[in-house]
Image (cartoon, rainbow, N blue to C red):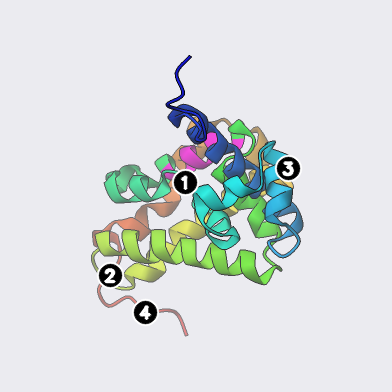
Amino acid sequence: MGTEHVGRPRRRDAAATRQSLLDAARVLMAERGVEGTSTRDVATAAGVNQALVYRYFGSKEKLFAEAASGGDSDNIIRDTPLAELPHTLLGHALDLTAAGTGGGAAISRFVGAANDDTVRAILRERIDSAFGDLLADRLDGPDTALRAELLAAIIVGVSFLRDKIGTTALSSVDRATLGAYVDRLAAPLLATDQVPEDFSPVT
């Protein structure tokens, strides 16, 4: 029997272990907050040795920052045509929610745990990076960062009400109908020709 893999996990096992740690961190951080969750807790929930947290992530903070990243959301924001972006982001969040422990479900749980200073800081950094930077850079016209964050508010708000609160209409509506309404709601935020250059808030 060969010994070339002794002492280190095979690539596919490493990927599965890494994902298990992320899933466990998402659930525990949302339930207990960052300060109330140790790397030992995460490792135990994932069924692995605590040392693997540091092997794959380097620190507790980096683990939780990645756990809050929402998977491929950065690539979606960067690459999806703007007209398709609202329902695509929503679909991504709902897909992850359906998976049980993914980023979409975590978003709504993190919002509920946002009294934790570290959770709040992680969420703020993720929204600033993905929406305030990546999406805002793709927009033209006035108030690009504000419009990008308003889209984030729509996606997070829908996820929160549907997953965490379970409101009747949002929980029961089919995804195609929900996505169509979200597209219509978000269109003025993303289309430059619908945001007048002289637009100013009502005072």
Q: Please say if the residues under marks 4 and 1 sit with CB atoms less than 8 Å apart.
A: no
Q: Which residue is mark 2?
A: 196
| Residue placed under numbered mark 1 in the picture | 182
Helix, strand or loop for disc 1: helix
Residues packed near mark 3 inside 10 Å, few (<14), some (14 to 19) or many (20 plus) = some
**Which of the two marks, 4 or 1, is nearer to us in this view?**
1
Q: Amino acid at mark 1?
A: Val
Q: Main secondary structure of the magenta part?
A: helix
Residue depicted at 59% across the width and 32% down the height: 99
Tell me where residue 46 appears, x and y as whole percent: 67, 38
The furthest residue to the bottom? 203
Q: Residues within 10 Å of mark 1 (few under 14, many from 20)?
A: some
**Which circle marks residue 44 in the picture?**
3
Compare marks 1 and 2 and give the one earlier in the sequence.
1
Task: State which region is magenta.
Answer: 89-97
The numbered dot on residue 164 is none
**Amino acid of disc 2:** Pro
Kindly report the distance in space between the C-alpha atoms of the residues bearing marks 4 and 1. Answer: 24 Å
Disc 4 target residue = 200
Task: Give how far apart the Cα atoms at labels 2 and 3 are.
Answer: 54 Å
What crowding class fits label 2: few (fewer than 14 Cα within 10 Å), some (14-19), or many (20 or more)?
A: few
Viewer-nearest residue: 131 or 53: 53
